[in-house]
Image: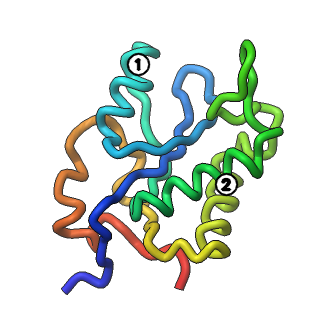
Amino acid sequence: MSTIILPGECSWFYLIELWHNHIKGFGITMNIDRRLTKGYCNPSASIQKFFHLYYGKRSQIQALERWFKNEYRSELLVLLDKKLEWMDPKSELADLSMMVKVIEERIEVAGYDEIYRVRSKHLPYKPGPYFKDIKLNPDFYLEVIAE
């Protein structure tokens, strides 16, 4: 019997470090394989990996991303004319462990009890259908963040 019960509509929240320049970023997606391949690997002409992944209720994932963008707006990288979903390399949040700490604290404080952390044994994630049965066996892939 699974201890994690996933809601019907789920999404991913990811943290990424680009291989070629080590800039850290974040985002949400409903399909991590397509997002990683078409959003990062193909445009950079190199395999990229998601270093931290969270999975859960779409509305909570969206709220988490919206909060993070608003709360850390001044820490986001600006290249030409707009803030991006990349951390400014001068920010303390350019350290993935700091980003994880902030994200997980927010998940706990906001009571996002339907967002789960992908277990470290499944990371970093590179393109492929690795999580294809995540809804059938969530306890194998996921763990509760706050208890």
Q: Quadrant of residue 91?
A: top right
In terms of sequence position, does the residue under pointer 1 or pointer 2 come before the other? 1
Position of residue 142 measured from the top left corner of the image (x, y, whole percent): 36, 67
Crowding at mark 1 (Cα within 10 Å: few <14, some 14-19, many 20+): few
Q: Nearer the viewer, mark 1 or mark 2?
A: 2
Please report the residue visible at 62 percent of the width from the left and 36 percent of the height from the top: 24
For the residues labelled 1 and 2, the Cα–Cα distance comes to 30 Å
* Whether label 1 touches label 2, CB < 8 Å: no
Residue 73 drawn above or below residue 147: above
**What residue did someone put label 1 on?**
46
Q: Quadrant of residue 31?
A: top left
**What residue did someone put label 2 on?**
67
Helix, strand or loop status at disc 2:
helix
Position of residue 121 measured from the top left corner of the image (x, y, whole percent): 37, 59
Residue 47 drawn above or below residue 121: above
Q: Quadrant of residue 114?
A: bottom left
Say which quadrant the N terminus sits in: bottom left
Please report the residue visible at 31 percent of the width from the left and 60 percent of the height from the top: 9
Helix, strand or loop status at disc 1:
loop
Position of residue 130 measured from the top left corner of the image (x, y, whole percent): 23, 48
Position of residue 58 measured from the top left corner of the image (x, y, whole percent): 41, 58
Report whether 74 appears left or right of 68: right
Residue 142 drawn above or below residue 55: below
Badge 2 amino acid: Trp
Badge 1 amino acid: Ser
Please report the residue visible at 69 percent of the width from the left and 60 percent of the height from the top: 102
Crowding at mark 2 (Cα within 10 Å: few <14, some 14-19, many 20+): some
